[in-house]
């Protein structure tokens, strides 16, 4: 029987998915074109798509990954991108040429398949691990697996340092199934399934602290009681356990 293992990368908004057959680098929320929004606010940044692509190439080499899975929101525009964003998307994928890529659609990825000329999936299953962006319902098959990995929420925590200064930092969430809530929608959900919510890969996105998430920002799997949000474990980007959304909201 092939065994599967999931491992967070230290100080990176990415993880490795191991099997006896292959090792995948998994990441999400790239949001190519976000710089334009920042530019409109007076912040001028250039070349971020190129930097992210080169970071991915480096992570593939450092970790000897044989493939990359992109968990949605590759681009910032929800519909068809403007000329500049489209050029950045093409440059991003050109740098990744030669790497085995698999893409899961995000809520910002309208028309992406037309631009990159690649198949884009709603959901991916690798052995006992299912992956999707996080804005749509998982399938029955996905809920029968050991792990469900999603992006979408731009998870963060609010941290106070020794001098009393407060700053936000990217974070991870690891949650268990809420059996009662899951039974209402999924007949064959694995009682031991774990939900992993990833931070955004784009360095320009920190996210909203878990203790401050409201109905508009919380993952639909939490909002609808499929997984236990309040008692989930929250980890820093460096791997330290910080508490639960219930304790962190205090």
Image (tube, grey):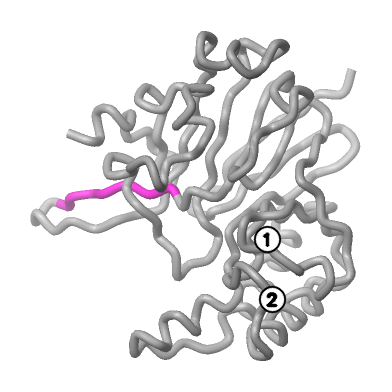
Which residue extends farthest left? 163
Query: Which residue is disc 2 drawn over?
Result: 80
How packed mark 1 is, by other alpha carbons closer than 10 Å (few <14, some 14-19, many 20 or more), is some
Q: Residue at x 58, y 14 (%)?
A: 184
Name the side, left or right, on which 46 lies relative to 208: right
Range of magenta residues: 155-161
Separation (CA) of disc 2 from disc 1: 29 Å
Q: Residue at x 24, y 28 (%)?
A: 247
Dominant secondary-structure state across the stretch colored magenta: strand
| Rendered location of residue 37, percent (x, y) | 45, 80
Q: Compared to 1, does 207 lie above or below?
A: below
Q: Compared to 90, does 174 lie above or below?
A: above
Q: Secondary structure at mark 1?
A: helix
Q: Quadrant of the N terminus?
A: top right
Q: Can residue 157 be found in the magenta stretch?
A: yes
| Rendered location of residue 49, percent (x, y) | 62, 78
Q: Compared to 214, does 27 lie above or below?
A: below
Residues tagged 2 and 1 counted as in contact (Cβ below 8 A): no
Q: Quadrant of the C terminus?
A: top left
Q: Which mark is residue 108?
A: none
Q: Quadrant of residue 163?
A: bottom left
Residue depth check, mark 2 versus mark 1: number of the one nearer the observer: 2
Q: Secondary structure at mark 2?
A: loop
Q: Residue at x 81, y 49 (%)?
A: 121
| Rendered location of residue 140, percent (x, y) | 75, 23
Q: Can residue 37 be found in the magenta stretch?
A: no
Name the side, left or right, on which 124 lies relative to 38: right
Q: Residue at x 12, y 51 (%)?
A: 162
Name the side, left or right, on which 219 lies relative to 150: left
How packed mark 2 is, by other alpha carbons closer than 10 Å (few <14, some 14-19, many 20 or more), is some
Query: Which residue is disc 1 drawn over?
Result: 59
| Rendered location of residue 119, percent (x, y) | 88, 58
């Amino acid at each position: 029987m092939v065994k599967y293992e999931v491992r967070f990368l230290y100080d990176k908004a990415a993880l490795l998915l191991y099997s006896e057959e292959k090792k995948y680098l998994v990441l999400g929320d790239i949001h190519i074109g976000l710089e334009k929004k920042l530019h409109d606010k007076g912040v001028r940044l250039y070349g971020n798509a190129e930097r992210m692509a080169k970071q991915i190439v480096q992570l593939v080499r450092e970790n000897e990954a044989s493939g990359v899975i992109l968990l949605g929101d590759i681009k910032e525009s929800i519909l068809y991108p403007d000329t500049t964003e489209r050029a950045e998307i093409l440059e991003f994928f050109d740098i990744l040429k030669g790497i085995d890529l698999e893409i899961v659609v995000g809520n910002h990825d309208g028309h992406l398949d037309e631009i990159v000329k690649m198949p884009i999936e709603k959901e991916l299953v690798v052995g006992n691990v299912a992956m999707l962006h996080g804005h749509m319902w998982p399938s029955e098959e996905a809920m029968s697996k050991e792990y469900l990995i999603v992006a979408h929420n731009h998870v963060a925590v609010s941290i106070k340092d020794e001098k009393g200064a407060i700053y936000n930092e990217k974070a991870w969430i690891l949650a268990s199934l809420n059996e009662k809530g899951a039974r209402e929608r999924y007949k064959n959900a694995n009682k031991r399934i774990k939900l992993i919510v990833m931070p955004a890969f784009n360095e320009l996105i920190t996210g909203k602290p878990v203790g401050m998430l409201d109905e508009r920002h919380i993952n639909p799997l939490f909002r609808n009681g499929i997984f236990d949000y309040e008692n989930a474990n929250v980890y820093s980007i460096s791997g330290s356990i910080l508490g639960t959304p219930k304790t962190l909201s205090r």
